[in-house]
């Protein structure tokens, strides 16, 4: 190969590497806008799907902890493994997810309407030893799961329990004796 041919190949290879390095940190504004739009739409879709799937899906996490955990992990793996996603897009997606988490929790603390829109109410599953079958069916809880929760508290008979509540985290709260003083803790509990 001639000296001119070698110089031509070397200059094109150098240009390719320079373009590759430029795209490593920043691709274009269209890419940023796409990341912004897709991240917000995916976040809203995830909230809707989790809220419609019920409390059992969350199992010990509230919806927003769950969403942020899954979305950040997924975003991290996408940025790490997909060479076509520039670093700035991944960092921007992380920022958007964390910002949305903060903004929604900030709004839910200040506005009841937002809180009711994004969080569910605890559900009464058993009252004064009587199973609330409609609530169990709605929340997809079996009697066997109530037995297991009672056993964990050392209770051998559901008739000895005044209240079982399915909390917004998916946990079950068992209250063997409900007195008037404790009634305040049941005020936000949904009855089916």
Image: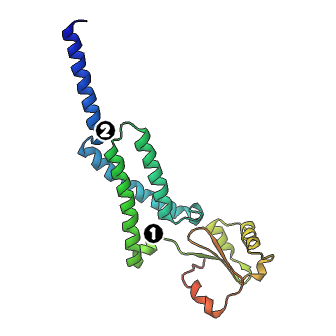
Q: Residue at x 25, y 6 (%)?
A: 1
Above or below residue 121? Residue 61 is above
- Side (left or right) of 20 relative to 189: left
Tell me the tag on residue 52: none
> For the C terminus, which image quadrant?
bottom right
| Mark 2 vs 1, N-terminal side | 2
Q: Does residue 161 lie above or below 102 as drawn?
A: below
Residue 27 percent location from the top left of the image: 27, 40
Which of the two residues, 140 or 119, is positioned nearer the viewer here?
A: 119
Circle 2 or circle 1, nearest the eye = 2
Disc 2 from disc 1: Cα separation: 37 Å
View extreme (top): residue? 1
Residue 40 appears in the figure:
no
Residue at (33, 41) in percent of width and height: 86
Q: Is residue 94 above or below residue 1?
A: below
Furthest residue toward front: 3
Q: Is residue 92 left or right of residue 191?
A: left
Q: Residue 171 location, x and y as percent?
A: 62, 69
- The picture places residue 160, in percent across and down from the top left corner, at 77, 82
Q: Callout 2 environment at 10 Å: few (<14), some (14 to 19), or many (20+)? A: some
Q: Which residue bears the numbered disc 2? A: 24
Q: Residue at x 38, y 78 (%)?
A: 110
Residue designated by label 1: 118
Farthest-out residue, bottom: 180
- Secondary structure under tag 2 reads helix
Side (left or right) of 128 relative to 45: right
Q: Contact, CB < 8 Å: mark 2 with mark 1?
A: no
Q: Give the left or right position of residue 25, taking residue 110 as reference.
A: left
Q: Measuring 34% from the left and 44% from the top, which residue is drawn there?
A: 87
The quadrant in which residue 191 appears is bottom right
């Amino acid at each position: 190969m001639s000296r001119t041919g070698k110089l031509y190949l070397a200059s094109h290879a150098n240009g390719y590497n320079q373009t590759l390095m430029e795209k490593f940190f920043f691709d274009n504004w269209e890419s940023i806008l796409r990341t912004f739009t897709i991240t917000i739409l995916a976040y809203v879709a995830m909230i809707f799907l989790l809220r419609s799937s019920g409390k059992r899906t969350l199992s010990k996490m509230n919806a927003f902890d769950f969403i942020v955990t899954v979305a950040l992990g997924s975003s991290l793996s996408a940025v790490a493994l997909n060479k076509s996603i520039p670093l700035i897009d991944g960092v921007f997606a992380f920022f958007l997810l964390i910002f949305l988490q903060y903004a929604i929790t900030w709004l839910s603390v200040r506005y009841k309407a937002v809180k009711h829109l994004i969080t569910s109410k605890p559900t009464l599953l058993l009252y004064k030893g009587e199973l609330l079958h409609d609530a169990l069916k709605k929340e997809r809880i079996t009697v066997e799961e109530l037995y297991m929760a009672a056993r964990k508290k050392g209770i051998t008979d559901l008739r000895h329990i005044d209240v079982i509540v399915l909390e917004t985290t998916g946990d079950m709260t068992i209250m063997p004796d409900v007195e008037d003083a404790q009634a305040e803790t049941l005020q936000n509990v949904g009855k089916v």
